Amino acid sequence: MVESTITRADLTEAVYQEVGLSRNESSQLVESVLLEISKSLSRGEPVKVSSFGTFSVRDKGKRIGRNPKTGEEVPIMPRRVLVFRASHVLKDRINRTMRESREN
Amino acid sequence: MTRSELVTRLAELNPHLYHRDVERIVATIFEEITLALARGDRVELRGFGSFSLKERSARIGRNPRTGSAVAVAAKYLPYFKTGKELRDTLNKN
């Protein structure tokens, strides 16, 4: 299995092929989708995409960390982190195709 | 925000597009990401984040109710790592 990386350009190309807008507009729409998701998350609002997964924001409290190199104690300030939970549909699709490609 | 609320929002921002085309655009994006992961590819969206697979080896699990041992097959789990820009945006204000 040769692993490669998909980027915005590939998503733009897929939208261009599928919907028949110009490449430029397809690219703007891909950007717009990512931006709207980011904006919702910045408001602290989770984004639920059916058959794909849920992005949600979790608050982390202050804790004492340690610099692994020097052993020095460093306070880690309270912060917000993004958590992605894949839906069952996504997990099943990944594992079904990966299994099939191994068996062949 | 749900998938359909996202579609509605994008349709408002793009009044020249048909609602069903906006639906197809959103569906295509998530479908492409899903297909890439199912092929074993990574998806890297700079500033937003990246999707990749983590391998979980086979293990003996337990039925939490009965305590009986159950074989759990090896599997891949999708993993999302938040991009730097989005992580910073979440922590502003």
Image (spheres, helix red, strand yellow):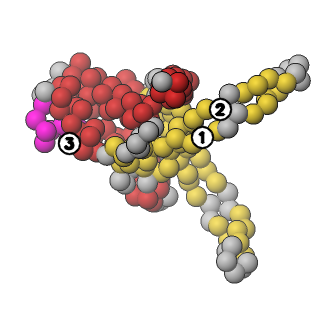
Q: CA distance from mark 2 to mark 1?
A: 8 Å
Labelled disc at residue B74: 2
- Image position of B6 with respect to B18: above or below: below
- Image position of A10 with respect to A72: above or below: above
Residue drawn 20% across the image and 42% down it: A28
Q: Is residue B21 left or right of residue A79?
A: left
Residue drawn 76% across the image and 25% down it: B71
Task: Confirm or deny contact between disc 2 and disc 1 (CB under 8 A).
Answer: yes
Which residue bears the numbered disc 1? B55
- Of helix, strand and loop, which one carries label 3? helix
Give the farthest residue toward the front: A104
- Of helix, strand and loop, which one carries label 2? loop
Q: CA distance from mark 3 to mark 2?
A: 39 Å
Stretch in magenta: A21-31
Percent x, y of residue B26: 31, 29
Residue drawn 52% across the image and 29% down it: A102
Which residue bears the numbered disc 3? A28
Question: Is residue B5 at all visible to an observer of this figure?
Answer: no
Q: Amino acid at mark 2?
A: Ala
